[in-house]
Amino acid sequence: MQQLQTLQGQLGQSHGVIAAAAEDNAAYHTLLTNPDLLADYVNEFYGPNGPYPTETSQDRLAAEVAANERVMPAAAPAYQRPQMPMPSPEVQASSGGDDFWSVFSQISDRNPAAAWQILSQATPEALRSKVLVSEG
C-alpha cells in the first residue's frame, strides 16, 4: 500500500510537470504564430526597459562625448630629427666626382669609342654622384 501511495505521489508530480510544459508550449505557440504579439514582445525585449536594450544614435553620441571628456595622458614628445650640418660645396668637389665627369666629357667628345674605357676606371662614388644627378 505504501508503494502505491508513493507511486501516486510521483505520478501527480509528473502530471503537474507535464501540464506546466503543455501550458508553456501553448504560450510559445501563441507568441510565435501571432505577429502582433511577437512584435510587441521583441520591441519590449530590445526596448529601453528590456534586458537587451539596443543602442540608439543618442546613446552612441553620449558615449563618444563622455570618452572625449576623459582626461587623456600627456602625449610623449614628438620625435625630432637630429640636426646635421650641411656639407660645404668644397667637400663635394674634393670627392673627385665632378673632376671625373669633366674629364670624361672632354675625352668622350674627342673620342666617343674610348668612353667605355674611361667609365670602367670610374670609382663607385663618382658613378653614384652621376646617378643622383641624373635622377634628381
Image (cartoon, rainbow, N blue to C red):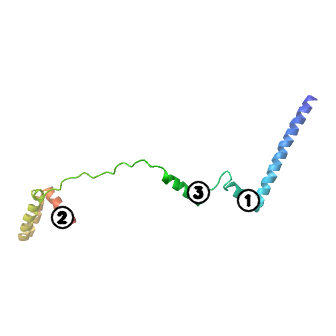
Residue 60 horizontal/vertical position (percent): 56, 57
Mark 1 and mark 2 lie on one chain; the one further toward the N terminus is: 1
**Callout 3, which amino acid?**
Asp
Question: Residue shown at 81%/53% (left/top)?
Answer: 26
Q: Front-most of 103 and 98?
A: 98
Looking at this rendering, what residue extends furthest in the bottom direction?
Answer: 109
Report the Cα–Cα distance between label 2 and label 3.
60 Å
Determine the residue positioned at 89% across, 34% down: 7
- Residue located beneath label 1 in the image: 40
- Tell me the CA gap for discs 3 and 1: 22 Å
User: Where's the N terminus, which quadrant?
Assistant: top right
Closer to viewer: mark 1 or mark 2? 1
In the visual, does 36 lie left or right of 123?
right
Foreground mark, 2 or 3? 3
Which residue appears at 20% of the width and 62% of the height? Answer: 132
Where's residue 44, x and y in %?
Answer: 71, 56
Secondary element type, mark 1: helix
The image quarter in which residue 3 lies: top right
Q: Is residue 95 visible?
A: no
Instruction: Give the labeled residue for mark 3.
Output: 59
In the picture provided, is 61 more to the left or to the right than 18?
Answer: left
Q: Do the residues labelled 3 and 1 touch (CB within 8 Å)?
A: no
* Crowdedness near tag 2: few (<14), some (14–19) or many (≥20) residues, C-alpha within 10 Å: few
Q: Name the residue under label 2.
A: 133
Q: In whole angstroms, how far apart are the C-alphas of marks 1 and 2?
A: 77 Å
Q: Residue furthest right?
A: 1
Q: Which of marks 3 and 1 is nearer the N terminus?
A: 1
Q: Check whether the beta carbons of the residues at disc 1 and disc 2 lie within 8 A of each other.
A: no
